[in-house]
Amino acid sequence: MIVRQAVFRQGQRVASWSPRLVHRPFASAINTDIEGIEASLDSSLKETHSIESLLQNESTDNVPKIDDETHATPSTSNSEVAESYQSLQRQRLSSPFALSLLQLNLVFFPPGALTSNLGTSLTPHYQPHILLTNPPWPSEISLPLLLASQSHLGHSTSLWNPMNSRYIFGIRSGIHIISLDITAAHLRRACRVVSGVAERGGLILFVGTRKGQGRAVVTAAKMSGGCHLFERWTPGSITNGHQILGRCKMQVVDEFDRPIPGYEDQLLERPSIKPDLVVCLNPLENWVMLHECGLHGIPTIGIIDTDANPTWVTYPIPANDDSLRCVQLIAGTLGRAGEEGQRKRKEKARRGEVTYRPEVFEVKRMEEGIKTGGDEEAIHHAGGSQ
């Protein structure tokens, strides 16, 4: 528009010149130029008006009308938008030039050909669900794995327990650092204990009552074929089990863990079952349970931080009990050890070897315990008289 106005002004200025000041040939040339300019201006004006009318029609068709009273626009459904988009795509692809260009792009530039080498690849990288879905085996325990799970971080030096001095590597920024060599050695020893108990048909109880430990406890118990507890421990569940757990359901299973029917009446008078091994992931909150296990001679495995007493458990594992990743790593590894023990037990059962068989005097001792109310001296005299 600016160019058109400038040319129109110059044309008017040239047309206003007096013919007395110019020669006749030059005046005729100027007249022809003015006519050409005016013709081009008329054609450009017509094209401009046609383009403006076309744009106005398209804008009025695409922009919804606004109500003068409510000032609202009519809602357009998603199906109408999708149909308009699909029609536009069909119009674009209907031309042979567009099709040929699309085919050339697919041939010479397949999807991902230009962007496959961009960015960085971090391998190996941490995936939180792996410790729950596919925990490591005891043979895969290494110092870098324990270091990545923050197993070496202890508590402040002001909160330490002097009994943990043999597990501490040093001090960094006022925090005790646990020796990962000792952690790996104690974790492998605990795995051998869990595998041995599971191979002999023992009952393993996994306990973790802190927030976030529930999934790790349940996964480890399923792999080892044991039980789990991720809520508050009921005091007296072991020392007074015939009153607290007396009505819990029990069943008799064979060497392949298949239930055997027909013993329901005999199990009514049987005392509650006690675990053969207890794995505690947070001993500070469950010291009552550990005390009951000590009174009944039940071995325990626990994660001992620098502020805990390692004498509370039978097989301590010095590690960071506040790190959820560390807890999942240790629980998953112990669950894998229990799974290996269960596999060995079932393989021996297929060959006809039963690794666990209750003796007759144990059954009689249980029966006398029910009759005498748990008095050890009375049970001993009853067993000696028989």
Image (cartoon, rainbow, N blue to C red):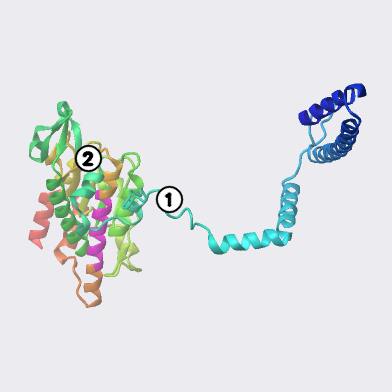
Q: Is residue 60 above or below residue 345?
A: above
Residue 199 or 124: which is nearer the viewer?
124
Q: Residue 320, labelled with which disc?
A: 2
Label 2, secondary structure: give it: loop
Circle 2 or circle 1, nearest the eye: 1
In reply to whether residue 94 is colored magenta, the answer given is no
Q: Secondary structure at mark 1?
A: loop
The image quarter containing residue 21 is: top right
The answer to whether mark 2 and mark 1 are in CB contact below 8 A is no
Which residue occupies 32% across, 52% down?
123
Give residue 138's position: percent from left, percent from top: 21, 57
**Residue 287 position within the rendered picture, expressed as x and y whole percent measured from the top left:** 21, 38
Could you tell me the amino acid type at mark 1? Answer: Leu
Q: In screen coordinates, is 167 left or right of 324?
A: left
Span of residues in magenta: 330-343
Q: Is residue 65 visible?
A: yes
Image x and y of residue 337, in percent? 23, 59
Query: How far apart are the alpha carbons under marks 2 and 1?
Result: 38 Å
The image quarter in which residue 66 lies: top right
Ranked by sequence position, the earlier of labels 2 and 1 is: 1
For badge 2, the amino acid type reads Asn
The quarter in which the N terminus is drawn is top right
Q: Is residue 158 left or right of residue 249?
A: left
Seen from the viewer's position, the closer of residues 85 and 372 is 85
Residue 339 is one of the magenta-drawn residues: yes
Residue 118: assigned label: 1
Residue 355 screen position, x and y as percent: 18, 68
